[in-house]
Amino acid sequence: MAPFISRRLRKGAATTAVAAAAMAALTASQAPGVVSTDHGDRNQEQRAGEPAPDDTPIDGGSSYHTDLPPLVTPDKPGSSTDLPGLPGGSSIKPEAGIPASVLAAYKKAEAALRESNPGCNLPWQLLAAIGKVESGQARGGNVDAGGTTVSPILGPVLDGNGFALIKDTDGGAYDGDSAHDRAVGPMQFIPSTWASWGRDGNGDGKKDPNNIYDAALAAGSYLCAGGRDLSVKAHLDRAILGYNHSQEYLNTVLSWFEYYKRGTHEVPDGAGVLPANGGSGGGSGSGNKGSGKDGGKGKDQGKGEEENAHTLPKPSDENGNSTPTPTPTPKPGSGDETPGSPTPKPPTTPPPGTPSGPGKLTAVGARELSATAGTHFARSPRVKAVDAAGKPVAGVRVKYEILGETGARFIGLVRSATVPTGADGTATAPKLHAGEKTGAFTVRATAVGQEVAPVEFAATVKARPVPQADALARLDDKELTAPAGGSFAGPLTVTATNKGKATAGVPVTATMITSAEHPDPADKGPYFLDGAGKPVRTLTALKTDASGQLTLPEIRTGDQTGTFLLRLTTEGGAVLDVELTVTQADAS
């Protein structure tokens, strides 16, 4: 787990005396700035029939939100009051509000697992607690109608610099990073863990870590693994630690678990309470979750274009314009008003800096993009919002959409993403993965809720270059001899190299020829079998593997005796002739 994330109490809390009922579930906390990795001897915790915990936590050891629920300080005026449902205050607390789609996903996952794994006793409040700590409930419920995050939620790069070292396992398909993995989505799965635990929670036929329904069911399945009964405290603790093996993480999740069990309420999507200082961050590792050796800066910060792509838009009105947060009017006698001054009135006009609608969107940089199949586009589409005077407009929500028949997707395997413009008026689309389908498509940028002409980018996915080899060599020099009517014993394996280096993916053609001087295809002698079991003397659908090697299918001898020639060729000019000797069949 993140080795330098510390607990941070919510603003206004004056004491660490949390309600006894809530704290009964917690173990001793660490001092500020210290987080115990608490690895211990996991084998001692393992029960019969339960698989040994993976050495890599489900979120890859990313950082996490450390905000705690409101504290109980009834003896201090003006401080946070009690937990929901406890005497002495309102049962409706802002922090207890869970966005509608997110709450529905947690409850749907609980219902699904109650049916498929009733012995687990998974409460949806546990998923809510983990979702709060991992991503602030999908950034306050910033999801579309189907429950997919409006823009990707990514953890820090897991390159061993302050976090775990996990090299890329998904080709950057989910996290946009082809060198190292990053935790993805509202429940922060690393791609390698998602490959094993991904679930289709909304029945659309896809398993998307960026979809809250899919991610919630996957997280619940993981927590229930190994025959756990989450109504048993030891099992509950072990499940949470399997998600992220840190005592501090366990404490934080349990505090929210107890808080949500005492009462929650539904709020509209996008209206959830964001973690302190986390309004513009992403999921775990966004850089706004704690202090420590990085001073609160996560691994995503300072990356320019990519940071913009992961920013949660500010609250907006029905036209997509940012709305100012009203300043509360001080109550008489609260100590906040200036003596002798009149009570301030609510502002009637937006404060300076409130963005107005843009006059137009303009493309920044080239409008033609290209990439090779299976790779990332080197540049992302980028637009700038300006007003009628040509000045940049900040806070405009720009929606990027992929149009046309293509396998290209933004990071997170989504076809659309919404990004707010920054102070310079620009908004950069998330990193674009080319996919495997070649051809042209369009990326369209529109200003959400604004009558502004869209900007379109022409994108092309080119075919991968064909790997070539300038030499082919057998792995051994054994003579290939077999009696007529049988097959040659042992596999025939060759290695393709280019400038002395073994080369993967090299297409190889294998042909039985009449002679080296006259390499016409032979019509008798040894042969292969095609997919339908028919004899063929030419094979073209052959490629070397990741180590540059190719093992040919079984070679049948045929009924003719003599010496025959098998020729292997590549487009790079490599040629290898292999002699095949067929002898008389044994008379016995």
Image (cartoon, rainbow, N blue to C red):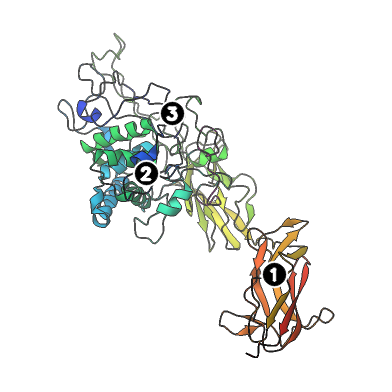
The local crowd at label 3, few if under 14, some if 14 to 19, many if 20 or more residues have their Cα within 10 Å, is many
Mark 3 residue type? Ile
Give the quadrant of residue 76: top left
Query: Which residue reaches farthest bottom?
Result: 587
Residue 316 seen from this side: no
Residue 187 seen from this side: yes
Number of numbered callouts drawn: 3
Q: Which corner quadrant holds the N terminus?
A: top left
Residue 82 vertical position relative to residue 269 in the rendered view, above or below: above
Q: In this rendering, which labeled residue sits more in front, label 3 or label 2?
A: 3
Give me the C-alpha separation between circle 2 and circle 1. 60 Å
**Residue 449 location, x and y as percent?**
43, 47
Mark 1 residue type? Val
Give me the C-alpha separation between circle 3 and circle 2. 38 Å
Q: Name the disc covering residue 318, or none.
A: 2
Q: Which residue in the protein does label 1 denote?
A: 508
Q: Earlier in the sequence, mark 2 or mark 1?
A: 2
Query: Which residue reaches farthest right?
Result: 517
- Which residue occupies 23% across, 53% down? 118
Q: Which corner quadrant holds the C terminus?
A: bottom right
Q: Is residue 305 left or right of residue 275?
A: right
Mark 2 residue type? Glu
Q: Which residue in the protein does label 3 denote?
A: 5
Query: Which residue reaches farthest top?
Result: 340
Q: Is there CB contact under 8 Å for labels 2 and 1?
A: no
Magenta part of the chain: 157-174
**Residue 304 location, x and y as percent?**
57, 36
Q: Nearer the viewer, residue 48 or 494?
A: 48
